[in-house]
Image (cartoon, grey):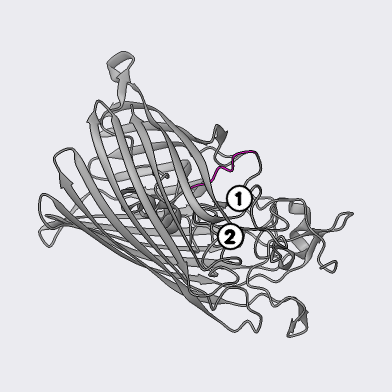
Amino acid sequence: MSQYPHSPQRRPGIRTAITRGTARWFRNSTALVALAASMPAQALDFGPGGIFSINGFGEATATVGNNQCPPEGCQLSPETDRQRIWADAVVPGRTLSTEVTGFTQFQLWLGAKYDLGGGFRIKGTLSQNWRDFKIDTPGFVRERNVALSHEEYGTLTVGETVSRTWQFADFPFGSNLGLSSAWAGSGAGYRNLTRAVRYTSRVFDVADGDMVLEATYDRGSDDFKVNKPSFYELWAHYGKGDLSIDAMYQRTRNGTPSAFGAAVFYAPFYDPAADGRLGASGQSVALLQAIYQYSPKIELSGAIRRNQWSGAYAVVALDGPPLQWNFPFNVDWGGTLNGVPNPGYPARSTDIALGARYRMDKWTFSTGLVYIGKASTGNPSERGQSNSALVNTIGATYNYGNGWEASAFAGMIHYRLKGLAPLGMPSNATINAIDSRVTKAGNWFGVGIKYNF
């Protein structure tokens, strides 16, 4: 273990599933409420001609979950990223118990719009998210951008925004089924874009339906000259009657290697002084989602996702003391490949999600399933590629009106193997702090309340 000293630095934009304190706060599979592609229609408009708008939501949940390790989780080094080998160890003799945990979230959008005439409109958006009374991603805002649109030419958006592969996986797909954490928070994608340029087409009439096409580019940090970041994403939407289909493809180079679908795309490391020691890396995700309104009461959902990582070898990025290691991915620790020690290996995996909702007056009942698949890789070391996970959820939501909703939910997770979590998950305890290294299964149930304004 001493061969790979612990680095005190945490991965930028990645939050561990287990936090410290008397009460452990964590994201549960129904507590996450996503951001829509644009601000909700009930936004409060004010100012001359309604030029400004404000809206948001707040929520709180309480969850009872079993097979957990109090008070600080099962991992011996809780602040260490799972891809580093010294993060594999668990606390000896720690017993599993049932825990009651809480979660709060608050999201605020501020907007300004102005008609320029001739069909042109300019719009600015600023938004931020707080979880458990802390900024969700320290150092980054959720959205801060300006968009110029025309009814015939489409929309050009510049600034900080979120990726489509996260946005539509999170809302409406994942949040409606209690699967936001399991679906939108896993895989090879990135969420936060910091220097994005996005073009969205107007709506086209295709095969008696509506189609929208979009392309996004983000160059990330300019401070990295050797391992220059680049982000490309394509999105196509097609809707016809009760059917809605979204296809997304995201390809990146030299972001922080991860399997955390809500990560920030910015740079391969937090300090550009390490640029010359880092190896290039990349990852991509292809996602297809469909929602079908089978009847006024029944809604069916299905999705498939293909993840791909290049792998990233492990290296001391900055000399110490203490030594600062890079953010590796799928490493054969202690091995060599073509003379390179601790090499990272390419990997591919496929994930599937299914769901159904039933509406009855003010009630909406739902059930969802996510399968995080095994990974295909040439890595001779076991880094979770042989494991898979199955997450099932059920839920009921009651709409009181005037923006208020109450919900009850339950779920379970089952790992194929007891050991390192599937490679496509960001941590070994991503889902409700149920750690795959100490148990193969876990369950939870809870209640929540939400207010939209």
Image coordinates for residue 305, horizontal then vertical, percent: 39, 67
Residue at the top extreme, as displayed: 48
- C-alpha span from label 1 to label 2: 10 Å
Would residue 194 be seen by someone viewing this image from the given angle?
no
- Classify 137 as above or below 50: below
- Which numbered tag is attached to residue 427? 2
Could you tell me which quadrant the C terminus lies in? top left
- Dominant secondary structure of the magenta stretch? loop
Q: Are marks 1 and 2 in contact (CB under 8 Å)?
A: yes
Asked which secondary structure carries label 2, the reply is loop
Label 1 secondary element? loop
Q: Which residue is mark 1?
A: 18
Q: Which residues are magenta?
A: 22-27
Q: Amino acid at mark 1?
A: Ile
Apparent side of residue 145 relative to residue 17 in the rendered image (left or right): left
The type of residue carrying mark 2 is Ser
Query: Going by the picture, which residue comes out furthest to the right?
Result: 321
- Residue 323 is at least partly visible in this image: yes
The question of residue 23 being in magenta is answered with yes
Q: Quadrant of residue 45?
A: top left
Q: Around disc 2, counting alpha carbons within 10 Å, would you say few (fewer than 14), some (14 to 19), or many (20 or more)?
A: many
For the N terminus, the quadrant is bottom right
> Residue shown at 40%/44% (left/top)?
446
Q: Mark 2 or mark 1, which is nearer the start of the sequence?
A: 1
- Magenta stretch: includes residue 107: no
Say which quarter of the image contains residue 233: bottom left
